[in-house]
Amino acid sequence: MEVEAAKLIGAGLAMGLGAIGPGIGEGFVGGHAMEAMARNPKMADKIFTNMIVAIALAESTGIYSLVIALIILFVF
Amino acid sequence: MNIPKIKVPTDTLWEIGPIHISNAMFTTWIVMLLLLVFAYFVKRNAGVRPSRLQVLFEVILEYILEKATQAFGTEERAKKYFPLLFTIFLFLLIANQLSLVPLIAGTTLNGADLFRLPASHYSLPLTFALLCLLLAHGIAIAQSPIRYIGNYFKFHLFFKMKSIKDLGMVLIEVFLGLMDIIGEVAKLVSVATRLFGNLFAGGVVISIISGLTIFTSFIVPMPFVILGILSGAVQAFVFTILLTIYMSGIADSTRKPNEVEKQLA
């Protein structure tokens, strides 16, 4: 296999596999936040802002894999 | 298909002696100028009867101050660190929305892009995180140097053991203390990479979608632009809050004895 092809496959794998975890995590956060909001609509604003922050934290592994994919593609 | 070339390093605009003025640096100066102008207008009309701009700033300021107070314990302590953290927050809040300004995306100078989002170059988030964390470490060292070193090299626990039964617990604690040194570096890298990755990815997605075909260059990128606005504001907030929590954690580490030391004492 050529080096160029291996780089492209590696970057694709890094991004695709790395996006699984954040997807599951953000689903959990969003789902439980919806549940909490439905039970206690008065708290909805506070829960929403906390949910956004939690989602931003959960997607960080996806961002790391993106950076790894960028390093594979553009630096090596 | 004319997808623009994706560049990770910045373009150099001018060279003054050995210093390369890159486009990210140039945009940073513009954001700083904007902040100064905003500050002037808010300060000029500041008073007991607030103007609209003052109300907006006070709402943002109180929200961040409340979060910092939760992290640092008392408002008095939070206010010592607050100016630095809030400046970083305001800077990122304005800098991340800069791509919404017309003409900022396509302007070129001698073939190089004139503007680039400051946070989409790795230097800026890394510098902010390094500045805050080093400052917190410096304050912790200045407060009590021996205690600070004792947080990472916990060999003094061996001398505090009462019986041989405590050996396992002490060994784990010493190992965890050494691992904390790696953890400090990981904090720095993770918090900087999160901001950089989000901002860079937002730009890449929009440029790829609008470059796919002629039909996708007008209305189709709009959801991604809206997502970019949201994620830019959220990431500025998350970056500040994480730095606040890390700084308070480092500053507190020299104050309280931890669990194992309490058990042995």
Image (cartoon, coloured by chain):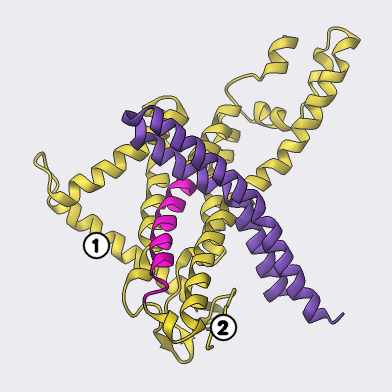
Chain colours: A purple, B yellow
Total numbered badges shown on the rendered structure: 2
Q: Give B238 or B164, whichever is nearer the viewer.
A: B238
Distance from disc 1 to disc 2, alpha carbons, whole Å, reads: 34 Å
Is B182 placed above or below B204 here?
above
Q: Amino acid at mark 2?
A: Lys
- Mark 1 or mark 2, which is nearer to you? 2
Is B15 placed above or below A69 here?
below
Is B191 placed above or below B114 here?
above
Q: Name the subunit of mark 2.
A: B
Q: Which residues are magenta?
A: B219-240
Is residue B255 among what the camera can see? yes
Q: Position of residue B223 (x, y in %)?
A: 40, 65
Mark positioned earlier in the residue sequence (1 or 2): 2
Task: Quickly name the residue at label 1.
Answer: B37
Q: Give B23 or B149, whichever is nearer the viewer.
A: B23
Label placed on residue B176: none
Query: Does B65 sit left or right of B264 as displayed?
Result: left
SS type, badge 2: loop
Which part of the image, by quadrant, shows the N terminus of chain B?
bottom right
Which part of the image, by quadrant, shows the C terminus of chain B?
top right
Q: Residues within 10 Å of mark 2 (few under 14, many from 20)?
A: few
Query: Does B246 sit left or right of A53 as displayed?
Result: right
Name the main secondary structure of what is drawn in magenta.
Answer: helix
Q: Amino acid at mark 1?
A: Val
Label placed on residue B5: 2
